[in-house]
Amino acid sequence: MRTLRHLVFPIAAGTLLLFCAAMIPAQSPHEPTDLERRFARHFPEKPPASFELAEDTDHRPLIIVTNLHQFALTAYIVRTEPKSADNSPQMLIYDALTRMGGLLAPVPKGLSHKIGIPHIVGGLVPDAKLVAAVWEDGSTFGTDELLTRISDSRKAMADSYDRAIAALQTGLDKNWTVEEYLTAAQQLQPPTTMRMMATIEEATAASEKQIAQVMPGHTIMANMQHAVQRDRSPARVAKLAQTLLRNFQQSRDALRKALSGTT
């Protein structure tokens, strides 16, 4: 059986202790003004970003994306082309607003995001190409289809945050116990639907939306379970719920703002 030499974990980074997991960039991105958002542009061919393939010290393949735009890079998509006929191309999505792909913060101008890509031990390293990107001012690069995949997962997560925020606020109003928060978090999980997909890309896009829908509820469950192990006092539980609520609101607002400004 073939094994993966280096895996990308798309959701793990944002699931535990979300209120302390956000990466602080080395420099603060410039927040676009409304006027700057009005002049956001679509780059049809050459984006203001550089892309390269490299290797780490263990010779595992890496992709390095460097932002050259004046506004921070918030999401991008890389297409990998396996050199073996036994494997299929993949679309790898990295989004700082949904924390998908392990991108935990926007990439300011002049800085890079470096991360490993899936690679089969003993196999040839796949070719890779930057095929889509979104910046904080609403500027974009890539086809409508690929940009829609980014916006769809962002909308799904924003909607999920709305439901989680409502649950947390109810818990604070009613002084819920840990068990009641855990029950509410479980109820936030969407039902698993088994449906045949016509293509791999369709199945992947559905999986991306599913991940976005389960993240907030999973974050509540993970943090509350951690609280049970350490300190389940009412004061501790309420403080944790308030912290999650505040962070969910900030994340939701950032998603809504990005969705309203994308060209």
Image (tube, rainbow, N blue to C red):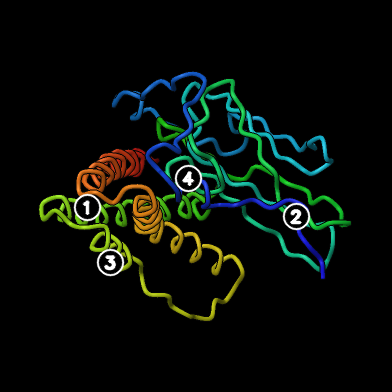
Mark sitting earlier along the chain (2/4): 2
> Which residue lies at the image location 45% right of the left edge and 38% below the top edge?
21
| SS at mark 3 in the image | helix
Quadrant (top left, top right, bottom left, bottom right) of the N terminus: bottom right
Mark sitting earlier along the chain (3/4): 4
| SS at mark 2 in the image | strand
Disc 3 target residue: 183
In front of the other: label 2 or label 3? 3
**Is residue 193 shown above or below 97?**
below
Spatial separation of the CA atoms under disc 1 and disc 2: 43 Å
> Which residue lies at the image location 56% right of the left edge and 64% below the top edge?
204
Q: Which mark is residue 81?
A: 2
Q: Give left or right: position of 77 versus 258.
A: right
In the rendering, at what x and y percent does residue 249 appear? 26, 42
Disc 1 target residue: 168
In front of the other: label 3 or label 4? 3
Amino acid beneath label 4: Arg
